[in-house]
């Protein structure tokens, strides 16, 4: 098992040339946010690329999905590597690879280069994801702050990336390159800063063996993990629809041609998710997951109604409600799992969480892209949304049943009663 170095004093002062623990925590949060901003940055540009290079909706979703599939490959191979060699070296490598991906976007002149750039970006993000998630829990100043940032930073980053790119495309010169110039500089600076990150995991044997494709779930986390699956699939499948076809829906179904509005479509979903995660951070994880799943189902229903009525205001209202459900449900699921693994298992457990999440993020979006030529955008989105609603309701109902069973399954023994307000662990 990995050993953990002595913690820095409570004052948070740095030891040697390393950052203080608290500064390292927020640096990791910034790295995660920037990775996610870069992930959504191309979304408002997809319509521009599609118009300039004349490729189909199927190819559009393939460009989107190759990122998630490359990310999945990285998670399955190097997702737990930081448990063996430390968080810092893995993150520096990932940041340099992400910088190279941004440089490819800068020079992209056809869909082939775009596919290569997205693939490299997915590999870099997948390499970083497990290390960041585990590092945030390692360095968190409070018991709940790590899971909160793990949940809020991705949604906030996705919102910022889509909205920022949409604004640049609409109002700034060189719309397909300026955003990637900014991101290239940002990732270079972050790579330099991460070199000073405090390291709490000592190197240990087994790094090469850890590269075998796998997703490890500790025995005590398996039942809660299975219970969280419908929630994880529903939330990230909805995210995949918006990031791949959100701009096309606003332009092709709602007839809104503004690139800024295309960015707002993604931002409404993910920004509302970030707000909901922050507001619900102190609530019981299982209740948050149940409420979030119900809100996701309700918001998706409103969104489908808006597409049927061609109502832009209702579409954004439904998107915001679904986004609140997205953020809350993922926060509840993540927090219910985060406490179930020790330092030597965290990166692999979180990698397993993200394996499910990114499969749901990519595969349904590709299937939707394949369906668009025959069904059309509106009908494809309707079928897709109906499946998300079914999964979200399943998560909400099964969570409620589990919560009720946990409340009633209190054994009667001769031992002293549990303290007031205590409850069984989630799952």
Image (spheres, grey):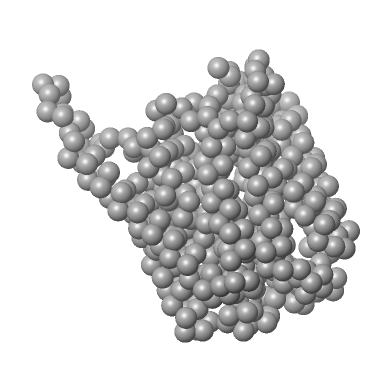
Is residue 306 visible in the rendered image? The answer is yes
Q: Is residue 306 above or below residue 193?
A: below
Instruction: From the top left corner, tell me how far across and down residue 103 is, in percent.
Output: 85, 53
Residue 75 image position (x, y, % from top left):
63, 38
The quarter in which the C terminus is drawn is: top left
From the viewer's perspective, is residue 76 above or below residue 262? above
- The answer to which of 375 and 343 lies nearer the viewer is 375
Q: Position of 103 compared to 369: left or right?
A: right
Please say if 253 is above or below 2. below
Q: Quadrant of the N terminus?
A: top right
On screen, residue 128 versus residue 225, left or right, reads right
Q: Residue at x 59, y 72 (%)?
A: 374
Left or right? Give the position of 411 relative to 423: left
Question: What residue sits 58% from the left and 30% below the top?
Answer: 214
Residue at left 65%, top 47%? Answer: 69
Taking the spot 50% from the left edge, 78% from the top edge, the residue there is 307
Please state which of residues 63 and 3 is positioned toward the viewer in this rendering: 63
Quarter residue 88 falls in: top right
């Amino acid at each position: 098992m990995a050993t953990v170095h002595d913690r820095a004093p409570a004052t948070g002062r740095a030891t040697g040339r390393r950052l203080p623990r608290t500064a390292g925590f927020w640096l990791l949060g910034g790295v995660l946010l920037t990775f996610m901003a870069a992930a959504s940055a191309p979304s408002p540009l997809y319509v521009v690329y599609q118009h300039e290079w004349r490729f189909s909706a199927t190819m559009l979703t393939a460009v989107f999905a190759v990122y998630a599939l490359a990310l999945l490959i990285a998670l399955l191979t190097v997702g737990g590597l930081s448990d063996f060699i430390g968080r810092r070296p893995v993150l520096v490598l990932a940041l340099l690879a992400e910088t190279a991906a941004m440089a490819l976007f800068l020079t992209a002149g056809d869909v082939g280069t775009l596919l290569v750039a997205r693939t490299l970006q997915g590999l870099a993000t997948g390499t970083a994801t497990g290390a960041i998630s585990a590092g945030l829990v390692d360095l968190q100043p409070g018991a709940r702050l790590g899971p909160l940032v793990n949940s809020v930073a991705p949604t906030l980053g996705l919102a910022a990336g889509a909205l920022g790119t949409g604004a640049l495309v609409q109002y700034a010169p060189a719309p397909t390159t300026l955003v990637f110039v900014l991101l290239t500089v940002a990732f270079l600076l972050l790579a330099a800063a991460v070199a000073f990150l405090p390291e709490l995991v000592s190197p240990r044997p087994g790094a090469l063996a850890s590269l075998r494709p796998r997703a490890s779930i500790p025995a005590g986390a398996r039942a809660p993990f299975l219970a969280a699956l419908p929630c994880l699939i529903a939330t990230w499948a909805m995210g995949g629809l918006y990031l791949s076809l959100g701009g096309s829906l606003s332009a092709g179904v709602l007839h809104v041609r503004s690139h800024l509005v295309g960015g707002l479509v993604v931002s409404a979903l993910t920004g509302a998710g970030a707000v909901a995660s922050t507001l619900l951070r102190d609530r019981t994880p299982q209740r948050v997951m149940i409420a979030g799943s119900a809100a996701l189902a309700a918001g998706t229903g409103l969104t489908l109604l808006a597409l049927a009525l061609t109502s832009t205001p209702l579409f954004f209202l439904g998107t915001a409600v679904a986004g609140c459900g997205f953020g809350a449900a993922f926060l509840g699921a993540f927090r219910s799992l985060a406490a179930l693994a020790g330092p030597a298992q965290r990166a692999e457990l979180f990698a397993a969480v993200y394996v499910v999440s990114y499969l749901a993020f990519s595969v349904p979006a590709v299937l939707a892209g394949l369906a668009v030529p025959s069904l059309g955008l509106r009908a494809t989105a309707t079928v897709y949304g109906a499946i998300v609603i079914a999964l979200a309701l399943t998560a909400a109902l099964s969570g409620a049943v589990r919560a009720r069973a946990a409340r009633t399954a209190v054994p009667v023994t001769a031992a002293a009663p549990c303290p007031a307000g205590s409850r069984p662990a989630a799952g």
